[in-house]
Image (cartoon, rainbow, N blue to C red):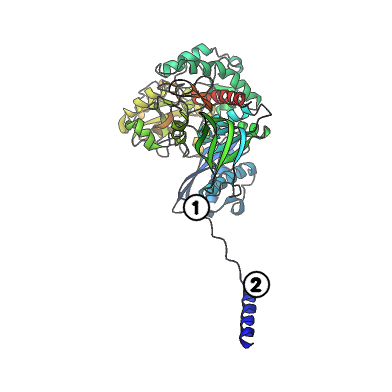
């Protein structure tokens, strides 16, 4: 009896202790080292940031793209300084800058998204998808993917799901600054620009060294103007038209003032996707294609927590982008590019090419990989060709011009690589700066070296004053102050990819289509040939994304 009472007393004491014991705190999420990307909506559009984590510490925050006012740029800098000081999720630790609440909240949202991705919690760890089905599945939530999705969902009877392996949507499109090439548009006519699809075709074929697939180029140039009109109907501002390298006339369509096309386009497509009830699943990585009897029937997908599920579909569109961030893959096709930096987002790793053999798909021109001539030399940030299109010049360390700045990218890149230190200086005056609002992003990133006059710019850059002054004079750059950005070529675009026809069917090696499988954007090959013209990349993703969405929807009906 005594033994029983002792055990009873012990159990009661244990129960009391359990009642008063504090539950242990959940482990604090750990920031994973790397460069993480996030977006938020400011007053004037999407704000894109890259957050660098080293030794589980935030070491740098860079605004890659934004379209805020000059005043708001000061607020962005202040928000970044506060975030670096606090080393925490911003919404609970950092107050908005007075007078710039919308911009501040956009920066907060962008940095939060990047930090959550760094902690492996892109959506808060809430969603774990299981086996399911839909009518059309789109792989990739960049410009091509969302364009295809919006077009496919125009048939209200179809359920469309977009899968994106990154924590955010956008891909390389978010960093695009130039514009959408199109010929014979209303915007060109309003500005008195004489252009035609035939001239667009000739420029594209010449720029691609005549290695382009003619039927793909013909389809691109013939559908571009209508696609610009369609995007405008969705809410896009494509009223400004600029000149890009290799084009005979101005045909790069972009927002008013020359603002960056990428963030604006993604904002428009995201809103259109929401209106169309398109489901977008981020941090959902496609591992393989599913097939039966030679036809593609869906995808195998990995959730954020590592679990997998099957999503069956009547049609699949691959819009995963290129492989410019996979340096091993790049150098396997082009060993000469070993050691080059890349301008691509981390997700551009070419995953889709591993899926093709299982369904009989084929590739074309994989060795055609483009380097962009003007990447900022230290941080490898793309400086849009539109800056040169609006009058900027390139000078070498002797202060001398050495190339036609508006020649094709391969020619300009080769010319820079032939200079001292394989680099150059992009130089322009205040008139050029004021003509292109996307330059303000570079100013906000502290990429501009400024001089009150040519002599001052010479002193700051080390360029010989007399030669620099003569170069500025030759280009009629006579509105001080003057600016310079040190640039060198970097890996930019993979022109080769999946073989497709003009309807964006994925093709086997015998030119027969793989049933149920379509592709669009940089993941495809043949449209650009050996060299892509500036402005044709975004044209490719929207024109052929729309075509892929249309034919995938027709196949799924």
Q: Residue at x 39, y 36 (%)?
A: 377
- Depth check, front residue: 484 or 18: 18
Give the residue number, with chain letter if any, for mark 2.
Answer: 19
Q: Going from the N terminus, do you reach mark 2 or mark 1 first?
A: 2
Q: Which quadrant holds the C terminus?
A: top right
Q: Is residue 199 left or right of residue 191?
A: left
Please indicate whether residue 352 sits to the left or right of residue 277 in the image: left
Asked if labels 1 and 2 touch by Cβ distance under 8 angstroms, the answer is no
Q: Is residue 122 above or below residue 353?
A: below
Residue 271 at x, y percent in the picture: 64, 34
Residue lying at the far front in this picture: please name it: 293
Report the mark closest to the observer, 2 or 1. Answer: 2
Q: Is residue 376 visible?
A: yes
Q: What secondary structure is found at the residue carrying circle 2? A: helix
In front here: 59 or 5?
Answer: 5
- Near mark 2 (Cα within 10 A), the count class, few <14, some 14-19 or many ≥20, is few
Residue 289 spot, x, y in % from top left: 51, 35
Other residues around mark 1 within 10 Å, as few (<14) / some (14–19) / many (≥20): some
Q: Label 2, label 1: how many angstroms apart (C-alpha)?
A: 34 Å
Quarter the N terminus occupies: bottom right
Q: Position of residue 267 (x, y in %)?
A: 61, 34
On the image, the x and y values in percent for residue 255 come to 58, 27
* Residue at mark 1: 31
| Residue 266 lies in quadrant | top right
């Amino acid at each position: 009896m005594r033994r029983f009472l002792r055990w009873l007393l012990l159990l009661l004491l244990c129960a009391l202790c359990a009642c008063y014991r504090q539950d242990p705190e959940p482990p604090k999420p750990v920031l994973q080292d790397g460069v993480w990307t996030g977006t938020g909506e400011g007053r004037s559009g999407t704000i894109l940031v890259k957050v660098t984590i080293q030794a589980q510490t935030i070491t740098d925050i860079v605004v890659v793209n934004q379209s805020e006012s000059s005043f708001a740029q000061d607020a962005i800098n202040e928000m970044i300084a506060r975030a670096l000081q606090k080393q925490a999720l911003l919404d609970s630790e950092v107050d908005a800058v007075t007078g710039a609440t919308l911009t501040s909240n956009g920066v907060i949202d962008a940095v939060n998204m990047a930090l959550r991705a760094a902690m492996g919690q892109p959506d808060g760890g809430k969603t774990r998808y299981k086996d399911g089905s839909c009518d059309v599945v789109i792989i990739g939530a960049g410009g091509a993917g969302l364009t295809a999705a919006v077009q496919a969902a125009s048939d209200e009877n179809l359920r469309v799901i977009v899968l994106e392996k990154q924590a955010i949507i956008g891909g390389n499109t978010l960093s695009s600054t130039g514009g959408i090439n199109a010929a014979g548009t209303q915007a060109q006519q309003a500005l008195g620009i004489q252009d035609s699809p035939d001239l667009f075709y000739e420029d594209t074929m010449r720029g691609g060294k005549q290695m382009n697939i003619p039927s793909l180029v013909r389809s691109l140039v013939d559908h571009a103007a209508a696609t610009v009109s369609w995007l405008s109907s969705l809410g896009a501002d494509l009223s400004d038209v600029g000149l890009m390298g290799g084009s005979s006339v101005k045909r790069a369509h972009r927002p008013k003032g020359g603002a960056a096309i990428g963030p604006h386009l993604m904002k428009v497509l995201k809103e259109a996707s929401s209106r169309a009830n398109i489901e977008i699943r981020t941090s959902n990585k496609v591992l393989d294609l599913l097939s039966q009897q030679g036809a593609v029937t869906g995808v195998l997908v990995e959730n954020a927590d590592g679990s997998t599920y099957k999503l069956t579909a009547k049609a699949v569109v691959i819009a995963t982008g290129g492989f410019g961030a996979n340096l091993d893959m790049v150098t396997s096709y082009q060993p000469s590019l070993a050691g080059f930096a890349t301008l691509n987002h981390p997700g551009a790793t070419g995953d889709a090419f591993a899926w093709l053999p299982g369904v009989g798909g084929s590739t074309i021109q994989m060795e055609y990989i483009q380097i962009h001539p003007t990447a900022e030399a230290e941080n490898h940030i793309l400086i849009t060709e539109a800056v040169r299109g609006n009058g900027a010049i390139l000078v070498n360390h002797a202060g001398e011009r050495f190339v036609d700045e508006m020649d094709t990218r391969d020619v300009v890149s080769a010319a820079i690589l032939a200079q001292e230190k394989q680099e150059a200086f992009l130089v322009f005056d205040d008139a050029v700066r004021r003509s292109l609002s996307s330059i303000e992003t570079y100013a906000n990133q502290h990429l501009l070296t400024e001089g009150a006059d040519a002599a001052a710019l010479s002193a700051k850059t080390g360029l010989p004053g007399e030669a620099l002054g003569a170069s500025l004079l030759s280009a009629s750059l006579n509105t001080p102050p003057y600016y310079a950005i040190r640039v060198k070529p970097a890996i930019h675009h993979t022109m080769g990819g999946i073989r497709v026809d003009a309807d964006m069917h994925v093709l086997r090696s015998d030119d027969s289509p793989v049933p149920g499988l379509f592709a669009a954007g940089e993941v495809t090959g043949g449209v650009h040939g050996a060299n892509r013209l500036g402005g044709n990349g975004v044209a490719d993703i929207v024109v052929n994304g729309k075509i892929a969405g249309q034919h995938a929807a027709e196949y799924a009906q």
